[in-house]
Structure formats: structure tokens, C-alpha cells
Image (spheres, grey):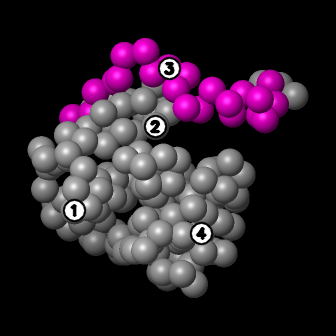
Amino acid sequence: MPDMLVRLYDLPDGAPFNARIAESGLRVRRADSWDRPRVAAFIRKHFMETWATEADRAFASTPITAYLGIKDNEIVGFAVYECTRPNYFGPTGVREDLRGSGLGAALLLRSLESMREIGYAYAIIGGVGPAAFYEKTVNATIIPGSETGIYASLAEILPEPGQ
């Protein structure tokens, strides 16, 4: 899975995404310190342990570098940045039944806006799965030669498929 690069000085306006998710009772907010155990539990339940470990680093930053998707006071999505490495976005995820709702785009844009606010001109989206989503939403481009990148060491700890 390659890395992608996004120009933070050329982001689309996040307001239409926020308006769209609000119609479905969804909202995005920055995580608070007391969200830490709920975020970890959400990620472990819906995604994977390595993502939970990576996202936990967001709570060591001030301000916390995590945004949450909320519906009915429940965490239904998350996005983190500055966790894998400086200037990296991710991991991120939305509960399966809410994919396509616009929440992933709203989380992505709010995170990238925060990265721009701290001074970055570009951001790296590490080890992307849905490249078409990032291309469409923020005009991200694949970084040539990044197929293994910094995530190559994960192969040492993850089981082979089918094990």
C-alpha cells in the first residue's frame, strides 16, 4: 500500500462535508483526554490492534491530534495525525455501516486543516488502502516508490494471510 501526498495549501472547503454529515446526526470533534479508552476500544473492535496502538500516540500531544466522528454520543469514526511520524495523517476509519456518509471526508479534512494550521504545506497519507477516496476528496497523489515505506517492519509482526 503506497503513501500519498496532499497539498495542504489547496484543500477543499470542509463546510459542505460538515453540513452533509449533520443532516444524518453526525458531527466531528477533537478528542479529549477522557476519550482515550473509548477510542482504543472502538478501533480494536472495528479495525486492528496496530491501529489502536498507533492512534494512542495522539493523546500524548497537546492539542490531542485525533478527531472523532460522533453519533448519538457514540464514537463511530476517528482520524489521527502526527502519530506514525511527524507530518503523517492516519490511521483513520469509519464504522462500516456509516461508510459513504461523508464522515470519512469530514474527519480527513478537519485533520488536514489542523496540520496546515501547525505549519505544514504538505501532508503524507501513509499506507493508503482507498487511494481513489483520497484522490477525489483532497486531490492526493501517490508517492512513487512508497509501496512499502515505513510500514515494512509491520510484516515482521503481522501473521501471514490465512494464519
> Where 27 falls versus 124 (above or below)?
below
Q: Amino acid at mark 2?
A: Gly
The residue shown at (37%, 47%) is 87
- In three-dimensional space, the C-alpha distance between marks 4 and 2, rounded to whole angstroms, equals 20 Å
Element class at badge 1: helix
- In three-dimensional space, the C-alpha distance between marks 4 and 3, rounded to whole angstroms, equals 28 Å
The residue shown at (52%, 47%) is 84
Quarter of the image with the C terminus is top right
- In three-dimensional space, the C-alpha distance between marks 1 and 4, rounded to whole angstroms, equals 24 Å
Residue 101 at least partly seen: no
- In three-dimensional space, the C-alpha distance between marks 2 and 1, rounded to whole angstroms, equals 20 Å
Q: Residues within 10 Å of mark 1 (few under 14, many from 20)?
A: few
Pick whichever of labels 1 and 4 is earlier in the sequence. 4
* Apparent side of residue 106 relative to residue 42 in the rendered image (left or right): left
| Marks 1,3: beta carbons within 8 A | no
Query: Which residue bears the numbered disc 1?
Result: 117
Query: In the figure, residue 110 lies in which quadrant?
Result: bottom left
Element class at badge 2: loop
Q: Is residue 151 part of the magenta span, yes or no?
A: yes
Pick whichever of labels 4 and 3 is earlier in the sequence. 4
Query: Which residue bears the numbered disc 2?
Result: 126
Q: Amino acid at mark 1?
A: Glu
Along the viewing direction, whichever of 121 and 41 lies nearer the viewer: 121
Where is residue 133 shown, x and y percent of the image? Answer: 34, 37
Query: In the figure, residue 43 lies in which quadrant?
Result: bottom right
The region drawn magenta spans 139-160
Query: Which residue bears the numbered disc 4?
Result: 39
Pick whichever of labels 2 and 1 is earlier in the sequence. 1
Pick whichever of labels 1 and 3 is earlier in the sequence. 1
Q: Amino acid at mark 4?
A: Val
Q: Nearer the viewer, mark 1 or mark 3?
A: 1
> Where 135 falls versus 84 (above or below)?
above
